Amino acid sequence: MDSKLRPATWEDDNETVCTIIMQIVDPSNLRYLREHPDDAAGMWNALSRAHQDCSTGGRVYWIRKLVNARMEGEDINSHIESLAKSHERLNSLVTPEKPLTPDDVHIAALTSSIPPDWIHCISALMNQEGVKAETIVSCLKNEAIRRESQGDIISVSSTKTNPSKPKPPNHHSRPGQYSKAAPTENDKKPRRCPLCNSDTHDLNRCRNTKQLIADHKAAQQARREKEQGTTSSAPAARAGRTSAATLGQSSTSYDEDEQSDYSGSYTEVTAGNAVASLSSTLGPKGSGDANLDSGCS
């Protein structure tokens, strides 16, 4: 202010304001006041310049504030005052050394039009000063490429088939014998159970087959116990060796007193094996005996 226009109390008022500013300002901001120890207006301007957001984001924020403002209600005067404050804040960031440029308007339009989840890729640039619009555009294009490639990776990984888990070993099998792997869902062979004459399941999963084998084993055990109880003290002759085809294995000869090792696991069988097994083990029925004969006379 021109010294001729100063009031008589100007010096006292200036000193009072300087004292108040020095008392209320944060100690970290005292370095901005060293150049104006006795000038209250100079102190205030120095603090304003130090804390004004002169970055690209600061300018863009107030441009967007002005452009996107909408009047609420019917009070036009309040709306005009709000725009005037935003204009004043924007004008404080514009100097002859850093004028407002079309790039600032372009950047403001970009940031106003994109979804919020795209802002993070340009936030670092917005904290810098003098960023060009082409830099912002390039950053957004790079983010688009990254998202597209990420989407391709996800779509490819989702189409990969999951590797089939190995079947645990059958602990009930004999040493040196391994059951075949259970048929997978990808097996395109038609399902057909010749025993039940049904297409709803195959022979591997037929409950009737399992029940027949269990009944046959029970009949063998009962007959063997009966014969052992009626034999004399002389050593009895061993029964003939019987050939039977168990499910999931080739025909195996076993002694009559040796237990079959059917484990109930799903193993691959054929109708021929099942027929051979049943035909070789089913004997003529005794009168009043519904159990399966062991095949021994």
Image (spheres, rainbow, N blue to C red):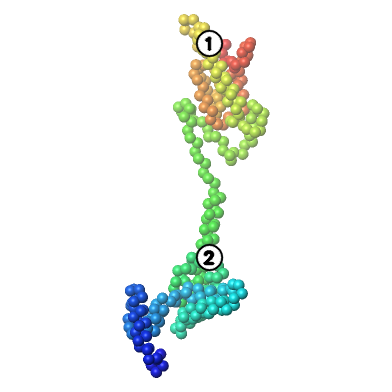
Q: Earlier in the sequence, mark 1 or mark 2?
A: 2
Q: Position of residue 99 (x, y in %)?
A: 48, 82
Q: In this rendering, does residue 38 appear at all?
A: yes
Q: Secondary structure at mark 1?
A: helix
Q: Residues within 10 Å of mark 1 (few under 14, many from 20)?
A: few
Is residue 287 or residue 109 the one in the foreground? Answer: 109
Q: Is residue 254 above or below residue 158?
A: above
Is residue 46 or residue 57 the one in the foreground? Answer: 46
Q: What residue do we see at 48% from left, 35% from top? A: 168
Q: Position of residue 21 (x, y in %)?
A: 36, 79
| Quarter of the rendering occupied by the C terminus | top right
**How many numbered circles does the render carry?**
2
Quadrant housing residue 106: bottom right
Is residue 193 or residue 82 the one in the foreground? Answer: 82
Q: What residue do we see at 54% from left, 14% from top? A: 222
What kind of residue is marked 2?
A: Pro
Q: Position of residue 217 (x, y in %)?
A: 55, 19
Quadrant housing residue 28: bottom left
What kind of residue is marked 1?
A: Lys
Q: In this rendering, does residue 243 appear at all?
A: no
Left or right of residue 176: residue 195: right
Query: Mark 1 highlights which residue?
Result: 226
| Quarter of the rendering occupied by the N terminus | bottom left
Tag shown at residue 116: 2
Is residue 93 or residue 142 the one in the foreground? Answer: 93
Q: Secondary structure at mark 2?
A: helix
* Residue that protrudes farthest toward the front in the picture: 9
Left or right of residue 195: residue 151: left
Q: Is residue 62 above or below residue 256?
A: below
Q: What residue do we see at 41% from left, 93% from top? A: 5
